[in-house]
Amino acid sequence: AHIAELIAWKPNEGTKLALLLSAHSSIPPQIDLDRASSDELQTLFDDLDKRGDRLSQLGAIELGLSIFDRHPQIEAAIIGMIQQIRDDDTDSANSRFRLLSALAVLVEGEVSRAKTLAGKPPFWRRLATIAQASLIERCICSFPVDVGGFTEWAHSGRGQQFYLQTLCDLRLEPKWMPDFISPEQLKAEFIGRIANAAQRHKNKIASQDIKELTLAEDEGSIRHQMNFPMPFLPGPLEGGIAPDIPLPPDLESSIDEALSKESIDWKSFIGLINSALIFKLDPKFADLAVEALQR
């Protein structure tokens, strides 16, 4: 309802505000662009390509791929946004992912300090704070600002508060860790979501350039940058969602073997701990872990 109200208010500006809510892949499909003309869509996507924040660009890519069979005129903008995300060097002081990470820490930390949204669940609060962080990013990048300097300041402002709040949130949503806000993890998540969207809508993608960018495995494609397990880790709104991906048989055997040894140490639990973030685990592994600890 909120997204529909934004679009009804002002179609172009409302859609850009709605895209700020793209912290989860289930949200962009809720943005209805059917009433927009071809020219309006072209203007919207071109503007996001040139001046959009990273999160809105991600949502626009996911949304654009889903309607590409009906609106091929947005091809250049989609390619431009994918290339920007692909080429963003997270080690650079001017990285937009580094800026988004710092802003998310700043806003989330300040909201925690002020006890704003204290009665809301962590995922709900993060949806709001990441949207606010992305809006600030969008504004910053519209002006000649020292992105590197601003990022350093923003990250130092509320880092401790963010970290402590996220640790507290683990009681309710145990799968999203404080370190998952890192620029590297944010980029990995974005890359994974683009790859998933392209795979989901591959029958709608007639553009060879987009196929090479999103579906190929060659150097230069986004899939070339997908390094397990980072693109598969939970996103900021998924800390309380149980994974539904089955545990691969070889990994299951490895965990079973590690926990069944007579002599164990902390390394014996690494496979189990890491797998719990990505795969659906059989309850038997909890029993194995308890038995291992008791030995």
Image (cartoon, helix red, strand yellow):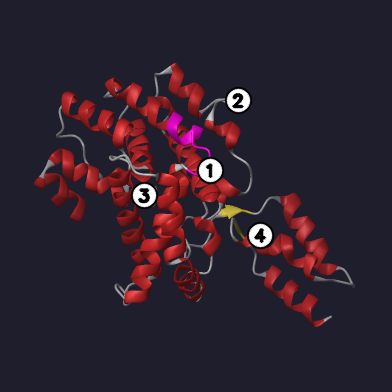
Q: Which residue position holds label 4? A: 274
Element type at marker 4? helix
Callout in the foreground (2, 3): 2
Judging depth in this view, the residue of 21 and 164 nearest the camera is: 164
Callout in the foreground (4, 2): 2
User: Looking at the picture, how far across and down is residue 4, in whole percent?
Assistant: 17, 49
Q: Which residue position holds label 2? A: 219
Q: Which of the labelled discs sits on residue 26, or is there none?
A: 3
Q: Mark 1 or mark 2, which is nearer the start of the sequence? A: 1
Q: Quadrant of residue 209?
A: top left
Relative to residue 259, is residue 74 drawn left or right? left
The amino acid beneath tag 4 is Asn
Relative to residue 287, is residue 48 drawn left or right? left
Which residue is farthest bottom? 294
Q: Residue at x 15, y 45 (%)?
A: 7
Q: Quadrant of residue 40?
A: top left
Q: Which of the labelled discs sits on residue 90, or is there none?
A: 1
The amino acid beneath tag 2 is Glu
The amino acid beneath tag 3 is Ser
Disc 1 crowd, CA 10 A, few/some/many (<14, 14-19, 20+): some
Gap in angstroms between the C-alphas marked 2 and 1: 18 Å
Whether residue 237 is visible here, answered yes or no, is no
Q: Which residues are magenta?
A: 83-93
Gap in angstroms between the C-alphas marked 3 and 4: 25 Å
Q: Mark 1 or mark 4, which is nearer the start of the sequence? A: 1
Relative to residue 175, is residue 99 drawn left or right? left
Q: Above or below — where is 155 with respect to 97?
A: below
Callout in the foreground (3, 4): 4
Disc 2 crowd, CA 10 A, few/some/many (<14, 14-19, 20+): few
The amino acid beneath tag 1 is Thr
User: Looking at the picture, how far across and down is residue 55, in whole percent?
Assistant: 37, 45
